[in-house]
Structures are given as C-alpha cells and as structure tokens.
Image (cartoon, rainbow, N blue to C red):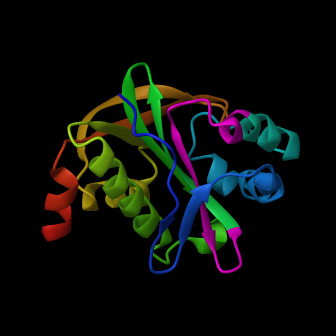
C-alpha cells in the first residue's frame, strides 16, 4: 500500500509541493553548506548542481511511492525538503532546511503538515526516523511531534566521511494527534 500521489499542502506560511528540475540551484546552494549536510547521512560533501539534478530526475519522474516535498516560502523560493520514503519495507521521514531559515518554526510546520496528511492516507502506518546524536534540535522536533526513541546505532555519514552515532525514532499510528493535543 502506498500513500498515493504527492499532494500540494499549504500551511500558514509555507507551500509544500512536488519538486521541479528548476529547484536544482536552490538545492545545490543549501546542500553545499556543510552546516546542513553534516546532519544528513546520504548527502555527499561537496555537493553541486549536478548532484541536485541526479537526485531530482528520478524524484520529478514520480515513479516511486515516496513523498518528496519541496518546502517553499514567498514567491516559491525553495528552502528545504520533507520526505517520507519507503526503504527496506519501512516508511522513513527525512528533512532538511536551508540554514538561513533555521529557528523560525518552519521545519516544525512543514513536518507536522506532511505527517498529518500522510497519516490520513496511511492511518495504520508506523513512520521511522532518526537523528545524529549531535543534532538535539532535530530530536526535539521529532519528540514534539510524537516520535519516541527506539535505539541507537552507528551509521555512515557521506558528508562527514565517517561513522556517526544515530538516535533511532519511531512515530506510532495515532501518536501525531496525541502530540498535538498534549
């Protein structure tokens, strides 16, 4: 079972939409910033426009069941990504945001909206995620939304070129609503 086609989600300040090839420059600009990529497992450093296009081509073809949202503000400026991907039979949440938009609540707003829509389409589905141990802001975001820690592991970070401690998390069905009420 899959969540179906990628919707466009509008929040108070954001539009979460499907990606376009024209997003390549904005993605490359953000992911060439080591402050962003150091917190991501699968993104290499350095990162350039061709890396962005290599990622965008299959994403824009929409042949996968994954949801890959472009986070946009204002006049459609691409500032980040929220994704829910099917990997190894499990649904996994991932996200990143251009550092110039940190600490404004944009990521909480975007992730909450995507999870809410996903849970309506896939109400009995567990969503997995995780953060590097040295990223307490991301762990706080996940806990606020109802994710609970399930363990720790070491995973390889392409940007850091080393193994990094990873805190694994999970959102059980119905837990997102409980997190909003609490």
- Residue lying at 28% horizontally and 51% vertically, measured from the top left: 120
The residue sitting at 45% across, 52% down in the picture is 135
Span highlighted in magenta in the image: 58-77
Q: Residue furthest front?
A: 5
Horizontal relation, residue 33 to residue 72: left or right: right
Instruction: Check residue 71 for magenta coloring.
Output: yes
Residue sitting nearer the eye, 74 or 129: 74
Is-magenta flag for residue 116?
A: no
Screen quadrant of the C terminus: bottom left
- Residue 46 visible (yes or no): no
Image location (x, y in percent) of residue 29 = 79, 58
Q: Nearer the viewer, residue 65 or 47?
A: 65
Judged left or right of residue 132, residue 163 is right
Q: Position of residue 27 (x, y in %)?
A: 74, 54
Could you say where residue 55 lies in the image, as x and y percent from the top left? 72, 37
For residue 12, what is the image quadrant?
Answer: bottom left
**Residue 149: x percent and y percent?**
24, 41
79 vs 81: above or below: below
Residue 137 is at least partly visible in this image = yes
Q: Quadrant of residue 159?
A: top right
Judged left or right of residue 62, residue 105 is: left
């Amino acid at each position: 079972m899959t969540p179906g086609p990628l919707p466009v989600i509008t929040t108070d300040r954001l539009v979460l939409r499907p990606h376009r090839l024209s997003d390549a420059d904005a993605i490359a600009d953000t992911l060439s910033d080591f402050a962003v990529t150091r917190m991501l497992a699968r993104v290499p450093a350095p990162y350039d426009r061709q890396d962005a296009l290599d990622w965008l081509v299959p994403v824009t073809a929409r042949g996968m069941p994954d949801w890959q949202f472009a986070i946009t503000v204002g006049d459609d400026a691409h500032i980040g990504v929220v994704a829910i991907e099917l990997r190894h039979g499990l649904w996994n949440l991932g996200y990143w945001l251009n550092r110039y938009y940190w600490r404004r609540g944009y990521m909480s707003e975007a992730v909450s909206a995507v999870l809410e829509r996903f849970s309506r389409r896939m109400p009995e589905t567990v969503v997995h995620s995780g953060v590097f141990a040295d990223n307490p802001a991301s762990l706080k975001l996940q806990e606020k939304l109802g994710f609970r820690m399930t363990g720790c592991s070491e995973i390889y970070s392409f940007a850091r070129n080393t193994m990094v401690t990873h805190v694994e998390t999970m959102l059980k069905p119905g837990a997102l609503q409980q997190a909003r009420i609490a």
